Amino acid sequence: MRRYRKLPPAKRLRELPCYDPETGLLTWRVRVRGRSKSATSAVAGTRKAQGHIQVGVDGIRYLAHRLIWKMQTGRDPRNDIDHRDLDGCNNRWANLLEVTQTQNNLNRRCQRHSVTGLKGVSHSRCRGKRTGKFIAQVVTPGGKKYLGTFDSAEAAHSAWWAAALEAWGEFARKE
């Protein structure tokens, strides 16, 4: 399980940034040390390389979606906070969901280095050479499950999608 630093008290968070649940934006409510007078009502935070917004509070940087969770619920998130649409900058309240690390990992796009370009599908091999067929496998709560060998990548992906929906429900992601 990932370890996150403890967030500032909810009362302190509500003093500094103002959160709009419809737009997902945090704006500065008051002038903060080191910021010019025009910085009040300016958008808070900067975009990290991984695509999430990071906000500094009392000299410590936090992920904006975790701060927002605490501002809205009054408690630190117990687990990860997922963005339903995979856009780490979209911090609208309706887009945020508290999930386990496993659930968060399921809600990912297909890996860039995937040879087939389809989640759960790989080339079938015999003695190191491709056979022209495709294997479908799905990760379930009980471990990896072999679904079979198929003549086409699309057929293997369909089998994977059905199994992923059954195993993970709303956390399954097709692409």
Image (tube, rainbow, N blue to C red):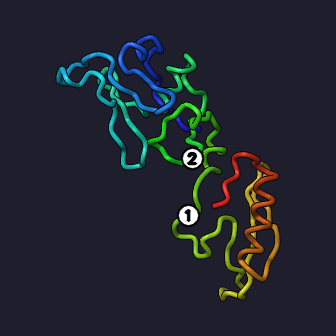
The residue located at (40%, 28%) in the rendering is: 26
Q: Which mark is residue 111?
A: 1
The residue at which mark 2 appears reads as 85
The residue located at (57%, 40%) in the rendering is: 82
Mark 2, residues whose alpha carbon is within 10 Å: few (<14), some, or many (≥20)? few
> Is residue 80 at all visible to an observer of this figure?
no
The residue located at (49%, 36%) in the rendering is: 91
Q: Marks 1 and 2: which is nearer the front? A: 2
Q: Position of residue 101 (x, y in %)?
A: 61, 42
Give the left or right position of residue 135, taking residue 81 as reference: right
Indicate which disc, 1 or 2, sits on the residue closer to the N terminus.
2
Give the left or right position of residue 13, taking residue 160 as reference: left
The residue located at (61%, 49%) in the rendering is: 105
Q: Residue furthest front?
A: 22
Mark 1, residues whose alpha carbon is within 10 Å: few (<14), some, or many (≥20)? few
Give the left or right position of residue 38, taking residue 166 as reference: left
Residue closest to the eye, 108 or 41: 41
Q: Position of residue 75 (x, y in %)?
A: 56, 19
Give the left or right position of residue 38, taking residue 104 as reference: left
Above or below residue 42? Residue 164 is below
Q: Position of residue 83 (x, y in %)?
A: 55, 41
Q: Amino acid at mark 1?
A: Gln
